[in-house]
Image (spheres, grey):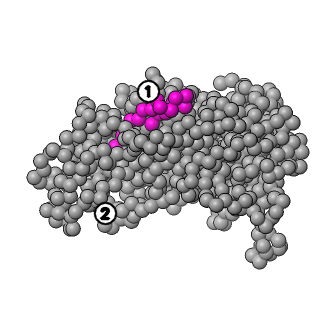
């Protein structure tokens, strides 16, 4: 998943009706200011709106945001086989759902490596900052050499993500800056939100990587939320906040407001829509037709919201084949299965949170709205998409609410589509299963937050943490009656869980001392754990390996985790490790130095044994000219007995059996 918003913004999805392609709002005579209802979150299902209805509600939202309209209070409303069954030659991007590809900064086809790079991380100084793609070729001996370098963007401070499908390399460049949105009430604080109002998409022909050419280059207005590739289709979810500079009112009088309301009603809707620009032809068009937008059932002409969520589909085979639909709302994130996209947002109010989920079906080679649902709570701060899982006709989600002082409320919901609604058919805890998710303290509250969630077939694994790490196993074999089957309590926590098969689960996080209540918890370093979950009522920790004073990018981004099944029951996996060392026994006075390494492990499922094989450590020939590189973007490729560690723009290569003996940078 790309970078989440710092603070989730309440979203509104509005109205209902038929369709019309004409924007007739500019001809509407307005003699008095309507009694607008205020920006609010709606949890009712969506319906297709006419172009005029969408226009009215978008403009109402812009007007209400400008005049700080208050937001009314809302009503409360198995087998034992390995999961990775295919033995492969090389590792690939670690994804949540098989068959649903995710963007990452490296892609590999078994011979050519595509690495997202930027001039700030180069060992040589560039005249102008730019993003580019390094294309590296692996020869029969395992050595890698650059065969091509393609500039993708010259925009400063962007994140670059890649997809590789057949002979097409898709390159996404997007900003991660922040800006402040003014509050809706004078007593409220400003809301901090991402500043990006455009991103770039390049599609490159890599049928002959040495002769890579750009076949399409687009600039799309909006903030990029997330993307997925399913079969040969790229799905893009983005948010857009229109800007209107025509407000002329000088005060909050009804006369001034009416003048501004008339001004925005007279604005052409095309000026308020996001565009997609073909940079090769220098032509711009609206990203969608206003008649292809959704608003919620039951809204009126007096409702409105000032943001647009767009779902865009682009064929990677023929990028001229594009389609988009929009919803008059703001979205926080995306979960995708092979059959559907689920866009979600969270609304915070009066110390509680409620989340809205919209389902879009991908059948018949089209994006079709299906249903909307609501659950209490939010989806956390770490890999929120992993709190979702679709199985058959069911959607399973885990939410959190509250805080460590007043207590957390962690809940698992099972939803089923019933018409155009995602209805909650069961949840935990409940009357027959009252045990809370998270350890209850002496004050009879749960003071542990959720650190990791993973759904696998008929189970959910949940890690909560404050002093120790309870690993919960939830049995979902009966969707109507989920139950906590077992729990394991150990020091430390896992912030990423990776299933191996029905019997084994990997956990990656931090280890801590086994401390008593009242003593501050201090993380001690990265911890890799192997759990036996064959008996769901009695999960056990089999092996653990610790890296003192260390952090792994896998703890916050599972794309940094690489795994390869080399034979039945035999796995190799890696994770980047960043360690800080002090040159003095007194850490307060010594000089701290950073070490970046790639840790290699082997796993035998038959013996249920995990073995540490060593680490490939980053070194440079000229230590005085080393760019700072954030280890969160470290990646690895495992190709049979060859190990490739990607740090910044470069590769360090080693043999699997002697990982510590590497060559690089390449």
Q: Residue at x 68, y 45 (%)?
A: 149
Q: Residue at x 29, y 58 (%)?
A: 245
- Badge 1 marks a residue whose secondary structure is loop
Front residue of 616/29: it is: 29
Above or below, comparing residue 431 to residue 584 in the picture: above
Of callouts 2 and 1, the N-terminal one:
2
**Could you give the CA–CA distance between mark 2 and mark 1, rounded to whole angstroms?**
40 Å
**Is residue 56 at least partly visible in the picture?**
yes
Question: Where does the magenta region start and end?
Answer: 312-335
Residue 334 is labelled as none
Above or below, comparing residue 80 to residue 284 in the picture: above
Residue with the mark numbered 1: 366
Residue neighbourhood size for the residue with mark 1, other residues' Cα within 10 Å, grouped as few (<14), some (14–19), many (≥20): few
The extreme top residue here reads 364
- Badge 2 marks a residue whose secondary structure is loop
Q: Position of residue 623 (x, y in %)?
A: 81, 64
| Residue 326 is inside the magenta segment | yes
**Is residue 524 at least partly visible in the picture?**
no
Which quarter of the rendering shows the N terminus?
Answer: top right
Front residue of 145/489: it is: 145
Q: Residue at x 45, y 32 (%)?
A: 322
The extreme left residue here reads 31
The extreme front residue here reads 281
Task: Choose top left, top right, bottom left or bottom right for residue 316.
Answer: top right
Q: Position of residue 631 (x, y in %)?
A: 69, 55
Residue with the mark numbered 2: 185
Contact (Cβ within 8 Å) of mark 2 with mark 1: no
Above or below, comparing residue 362 to residue 152 in the picture: above
């Amino acid at each position: 998943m790309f970078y989440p918003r710092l603070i989730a913004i309440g979203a509104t999805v509005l109205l209902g009706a038929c369709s019309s392609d004409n924007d007739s709002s500019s001809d509407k005579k307005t003699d008095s200011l309507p009694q607008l209802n205020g920006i609010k979150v709606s949890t009712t299902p969506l319906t297709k709106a006419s172009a005029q209805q969408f226009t009215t509600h978008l403009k109402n939202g812009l007007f209400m945001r400008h005049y700080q309209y208050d937001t009314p209070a809302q009503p409360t409303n198995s087998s034992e086989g390995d999961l990775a069954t295919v033995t492969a030659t090389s590792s690939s991007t670690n994804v949540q759902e098989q068959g649903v590809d995710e963007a990452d900064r490296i892609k590999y086809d078994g011979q050519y490596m595509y690495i997202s790079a930027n001039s700030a991380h180069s060992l040589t100084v560039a005249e102008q900052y730019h993003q580019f793609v390094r294309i590296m070729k692996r020869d029969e001996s395992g050595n890698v050499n650059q065969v091509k370098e393609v500039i993708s963007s010259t925009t400063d401070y962007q994140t670059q993500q890649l997809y590789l499908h057949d002979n097409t390399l898709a390159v996404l460049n997007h900003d991660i800056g922040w800006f402040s949105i003014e509050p809706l009430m004078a007593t409220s604080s400003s809301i901090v939100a991402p500043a990006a109002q455009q991103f770039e998409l390049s599609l490159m022909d890599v049928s002959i990587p040495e002769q890579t050419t750009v076949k399409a280059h687009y600039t799309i207005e909006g903030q990029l939320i997330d993307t997925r590739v399913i079969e040969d289709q790229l799905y893009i979810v983005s948010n857009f906040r229109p800007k209107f500079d025509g407000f002329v009112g000088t005060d909050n009088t009804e006369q001034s407001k009416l003048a501004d309301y008339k001004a925005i009603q007279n604005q052409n809707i095309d000026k308020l829509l996001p565009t997609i620009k073909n940079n090769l032809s220098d032509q711009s068009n609206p990203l969608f037709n206003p008649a292809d937008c959704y608003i919620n059932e039951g809204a009126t002409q007096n409702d409105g919201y000032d943001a647009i969520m767009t779902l865009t589909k682009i064929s990677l085979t023929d990028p001229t084949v594009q389609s988009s639909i929009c919803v008059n709302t703001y979205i926080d994130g995306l979960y995708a299965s092979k059959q559907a996209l689920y866009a979600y947002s969270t609304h915070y109010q009066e110390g509680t949170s409620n989340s809205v989920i919209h389902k879009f079906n991908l059948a018949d080679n089209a994006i079709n709205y299906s249903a909307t649902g609501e659950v209490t709570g939010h989806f956390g701060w770490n890999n929120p998409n992993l709190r979702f899982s679709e199985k058959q006709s069911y959607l399973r989600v885990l939410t959190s609410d509250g805080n460590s002082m007043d207590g957390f409320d962690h809940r698992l919901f099972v939803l089923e589509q019933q018409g155009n609604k995602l209805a909650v058919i069961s949840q935990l805890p409940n009357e027959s299963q009252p045990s809370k998710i998270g350890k209850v303290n002496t004050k009879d509250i749960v003071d542990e937050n959720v650190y990791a969630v993973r759904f696998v077939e008929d189970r959910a694994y949940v890690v909560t943490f404050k002093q120790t790490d309870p690993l919960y196993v939830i049995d979902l074999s009966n969707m109507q009656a989920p139950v906590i089957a077992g729990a394991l309590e150990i020091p430390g926590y896992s912030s990423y869980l990776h299933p191996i098969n029905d019997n084994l689960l990997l956990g990656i996080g931090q280890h801590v001392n086994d401390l008593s209540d009242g003593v501050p918890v201090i993380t001690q370093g990265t911890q890799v754990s192997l759990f036996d979950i064959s008996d769901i009522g009695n999960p056990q920790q089999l092996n653990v390996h610790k890296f003192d004073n260390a952090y792994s990018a896998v703890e916050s981004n599972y794309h940094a985790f690489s795994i390869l099944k080399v034979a039945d029951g035999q796995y190799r996996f890696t994770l980047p490790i960043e360690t800080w060392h002090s040159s003095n026994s007194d850490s307060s006075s010594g000089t701290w130095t950073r070490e970046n390494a790639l840790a290699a492990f082997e796993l035998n499922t038959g013996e249920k044994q995990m073995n540490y094989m060593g680490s490939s450590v980053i070194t440079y020939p000229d230590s005085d000219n080393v760019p700072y590189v954030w280890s969160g973007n470290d990646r690895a490729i495992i190709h049979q007995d060859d190990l490739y560690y990607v740090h910044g723009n470069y590769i360090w290569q080693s043999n699997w059996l002697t990982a510590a003996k590497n060559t690089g940078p390449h």
